[in-house]
Image (cartoon, rainbow, N blue to C red):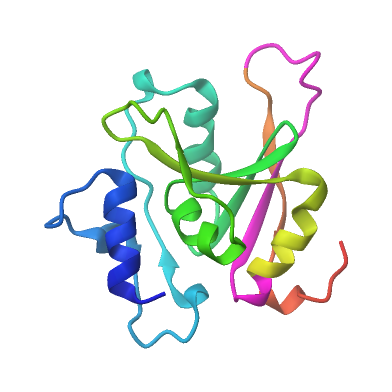
Amino acid sequence: MRPYALESRIRANLGLDRDSNVTEILRIDDSADSEADQEVTNLPALDLADVTPMMAQYPRVKSELPKDALLLFRLGDFYEMFFEDATVAAPVLEVQLTSRDKSAENPIPMCGVPHHAAQNYIQKLLANGFKVAICEQVENPDTAKGIIKREVTRVVTPSLIGDPE
């Protein structure tokens, strides 16, 4: 994808005007041969009073990862991606880019894949040069009190592309 087209999509998905500096959200190397050569950077600032506990958990997990890793965040039967991870991954995975709370002033971009098919999607991201962090629910949702505990259980890189698990 051309850098300008990607910047325009990010602006639209994050509700930014055309004069907004998107490079603070996604830095693009114009000489990049693949979309994976893009450096995914900061999450937008969130007012934690306006988000669900799960959406407050996501940036905490994301902040512990290398900046260039896409985070697959387990939510029930799906792995979801939010913010710039969703904006970058959706076209590569050929899945619908949508958003949380579409009626909000700044809806949060998101996309997801079913957990039972995740390995195929992870392989597609790896084949396109992306590093992928997999965040799992590490407690039983039926017995958990409050927000379900999640942890990054694996970070896979393109050098592991042949790894079946």
Q: Is residue 118 left or right of residue 30?
A: right
Which x, y percent locates residue 72? 63, 49
Which residue, as the protein is rendered here, is positioned at the far right? 164
Which residue, as the protein is rendered here, is positioned at the far left? 19
Instruction: Say if the magenta span includes residue 130.
Output: yes
Q: Can residue 66 be seen in this view?
A: no
Instruction: Say if the magenta span includes residue 151.
Output: no
Q: Residue at x 59, y 69 (%)?
A: 130
Q: Which residue is drawn at 50% across and 52% down?
A: 86
**Quarter of the figure with the C terminus:** bottom right
Of residues 45 and 77, the one nearer the viewer is 77
Q: Residue at x 50, y 81 (%)?
A: 34
- Where is residue 151, by image quadrant? top right
Q: What stretch is highlighted in magenta?
A: 126-146
Q: Is residue 144 visible?
A: yes
Q: How many labels does the image show?
A: 0
- Where is residue 156, by image quadrant? bottom right
Q: Is residue 119 left or right of residue 1?
A: right
Which x, y percent locates residue 22? 25, 59
Q: In this view, does 54 lie to the left or right of 116?
A: left
Of residues 131 and 110, the one nearer the viewer is 110
Which x, y percent locates residue 56? 47, 29
Q: Which residue is drawn at 61% across and 62% down?
A: 93
- Where is residue 102, by image quadrant? top left
- Vertical side of 30 occupied by 106: above or below: above
Of residues 119 and 69, the one nearer the viewer is 119
**Quarter of the figure with the N terminus:** bottom left
